[in-house]
Image (cartoon, helix red, strand yellow):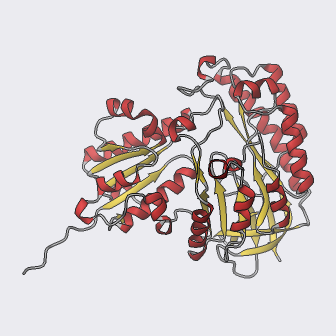
Amino acid sequence: MPELKRNPPKRVSLITLGCEKNTVDSEVLMGGLRHNGVRLVNDAANSDIIILNTCGFIESAKRESINSILEAVEMKKSGSVKEVYVAGCLSERYRAELEAEITGVDGYFGTEDFERIIKSVVPEAEMKTGADLRYELLGERVLTTPKFYSYIKISEGCDNPCSFCAIPIMRGGHRSKSPEEIAFEAMMLAGQGVKEIILIAQDLTYYGLDLTDERTLADLLRRLVKVNGIEWIRLMYAYPAKFPLDVLDVMASEEKIIPYLDIPVQHASTEVLKSMRRGITRRGTEELIEKIRSKIPNIALRTTLITGYPTEGEREFEELEEFVTEMKFDRLGVFTYSVEDGTTAEPLGDAVSEEEKRRRHARLMDIQREISFEKNLAKIGKHVRTLIEREEDGIYYGRTEADAPEVDNEIAVHSKKQLDAGMFVNVMVREVDEFDLVGDAI
């Protein structure tokens, strides 16, 4: 009997837009595709199929996602690709509108439609995976980050009632992954050479409430520090209201959990926080920050703020300026408010002009620039442990414990010896600017 001729594997380009949570989703999906014989390619123009994992968080992210969809559709019209699929938050929330407005897309999917996406790409007769790719193929993740660090999403969705946020609309309520599953994922990543794991969720501190009726992030951390090969564990996105203080005890006692915490406070005015439905006051926020710094004196605190919220008048903004000046966060990012459909803040409208939002944004970043420079000056002559990420023109670049990938600062490292990406080195700081450092490898 003549051997049946198999079709060549389909070439798929997966484009990820938005946050690190989308990155993890894309990596799991890519693992499922590759497991089923799909050839993954980086160049969209050299693919048969484009899959876009979209973001719908804020207005600018929506525009970027829509523009990316339109570009992919144009590539299909020109014949350079055959099929276009759209997934993720934007598609989850606005599927009907997208289907009506943008023709040429072969399928729209939500945030967790992994199996349906793979079935659309892979003929049913060639399917190998089971039904629950999110949990069955953790070991198949295709890492898109540098090989020495990776994100672990410890939960999905969110139960917090923040007035400005549409994440619960797009991703549903909070669902914790089991500690066994997370530990297994960490071991798989360590086996691939990952040295830094970055824990992410809509709210890390909510972890475990749906499993045990208690916040159990501290217990999870105690389990993860036992994973061989992992040297840094970084915590991102810790909601300040009802923060579980036992987490600080674990951070203070475990060397692998680096002294870094991303704790998005969003605002300082108690009245604005009340309208935002954040469940905490300015005084409560300040007391929490004081407790964190008391327990872990060398901690680097990152936060994010929203300016231009509808109830933020000049007095409330001045209060926010004062707060930023007094708190002296190590890292700080600022978003300008945008109205999100279906949120409880939508009826408040958009009272602050775009010009005023930009002015306030610039003012907050000017304050932070001065704070960052002052903190960097204090590092001159000190040694910092650094994770090397790359080399350019004979100079190495890396991150310290105080710096998360993509969003924080860098250190330029001069070394007489060759340094490899993923290597930890001690660096003496000798020069600084407002954000970045320069030093010599010890």
Front in this rendered view, residue 369 or 285? 285
Dividing the picture into quarters, in which one does residue 354 lie?
A: top right
Q: Residue at x 69, y 61 (%)?
A: 220
Q: Residue at x 62, y 67 (%)?
A: 183
Task: Please identify the residue farthest to the front as the structure is shown.
Answer: 212
Q: Residue at x 73, y 61 (%)?
A: 219
Residue 308 seen in the current view: no
Residue 131 relative to residue 141: left or right: left
Front in this rendered view, residue 168 or 423? 168
Considering the image in quadrants, where does the N terminus appear? bottom left
Task: Please identify the residue farthest to the left as the structure is shown.
Answer: 1
Residue 62 relative to residue 277: left or right: left
Considering the image in quadrants, where does the C terminus appear? bottom right
- In the rendered view, would you say 59 is above or below 233? above
Dividing the picture into quarters, in which one does residue 385 lie?
A: bottom right
Residue 334 in the image, given as x and y percentages of width and height:
71, 38
Front in this rendered view, residue 177 or 426? 177
Residue 282 relative to residue 126: left or right: right
Residue 57 in the image, given as x and y percentages of width and height:
56, 38
Residue 440 in the image, given as x and y percentages of width and height:
81, 72
Residue 24 seen in the current view: yes
Q: Residue at x 51, y 42 (%)?
A: 55
- In the rendered view, would you say 331 is above or below 187? above
- In the rendered view, would you say 221 is above or below 15? below
Residue 5 in the image, given as x and y percentages of width and height:
15, 73
- In the rendered view, would you say 358 is above or below 265? above
Front in this rendered view, residue 215 or 291? 215
